[in-house]
Amino acid sequence: MNCWGFHAGGCVLGLFRDVHGFWSCDNYRLHPKQEEVEKNLVSKKTVIKGVLLIQFLQVTAAILLYMVIGGSDAGASAGQPSSFVVIARQFIVAMVVLDTYQYFLHRYMHHNKFLYRHLHSRHHRLAVPYTFGAIYNHPFEAFIFDTLGGALAFVISGMSPRVSIFFFSFGTIKSVDDHCGILLPGNPFHIFFRNNTAFHDLHHQLYGGKYNFSQPFFVMWDRILGTYKPYSLEKREGGGFRLRPGKNC
Ligand SMILES: [Zn+2]
Ligand SMILES: [Zn+2]
């Protein structure tokens, strides 16, 4: 699952031709494109290799989990497809469980210098995030963050493996969008979620390491525990936006 189609659809609203006549989203970027090379501490080739390894490990873990749990409709009552209301409730429960698990783990990863240095700092090599860098992590961190967190959300929500395919795809698309660095008008993730591209981009900045730990859906834990960093967006000279951190809540 990926978000290319989604972005392609969203881009229709914001595409324009650049000075060379190519279609471009540069007028909606949080960072000028060249900063992906200038400011990031890792090459795109290394990121791609790391992401492919994590994808392989996570697909293997998911297959093993489904084999342990059983058939594709395990969890659905009496073998009948779940109603829309049941699936919606399972989605909400899974989102809250995953957010809660990831907030505290993420915050602890920043607090504990050993864990930050050896695990989480790998993700923060991307000061200028881009789509496929969304799941560029240390493989062990990916396991405890996403694989264990996803398994916990899956088990507590009681969703079937079939429903979980949609839930995990949704979560992956959301995470990719959070790292895309492009604020296209009409993007439904930016309309319905306060935890979005700009919110998470702030966390990737040097001053952002103490704020905006919530991921991937809501901002509630940052709000409750005082780590929410407000921000404003202003137009950047030459195109795109600039993120301005505000005063702490
Ligand atoms: Zn972080
Ligand atoms: Zn990130």
Image: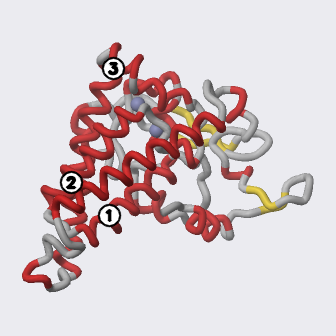
Q: CA distance from mark 2 to mark 3?
A: 23 Å
Q: Earlier in the sequence, mark 2 or mark 3?
A: 3
Where in the figure is residue 179, as x and y percent of width and height? 52, 45
Asked if residue 131 lies left or right of residue 20, the reply is left
Q: Earlier in the sequence, mark 2 or mark 1?
A: 2
Residue picked out by circle 1: 167
Assign a secondary structure to mark 2. helix
Q: CA distance from mark 1 to mark 3?
A: 28 Å
Where residue 120 appears, x then y in whole percent? 40, 27
**Marks 2 and 1 in Cβ contact (< 8 Å):** yes
User: Mark 3 or mark 1, which is nearer the start of the sequence?
Assistant: 3
Horizontal side of residue 247 vs 6, given as left or right: left
Residue type at mark 3 is: Leu
Residue 212 percent across, percent down from the top left: 38, 35
Which numbered tag is attached to residue 153? 2
Q: Amino acid at mark 2?
A: Ala
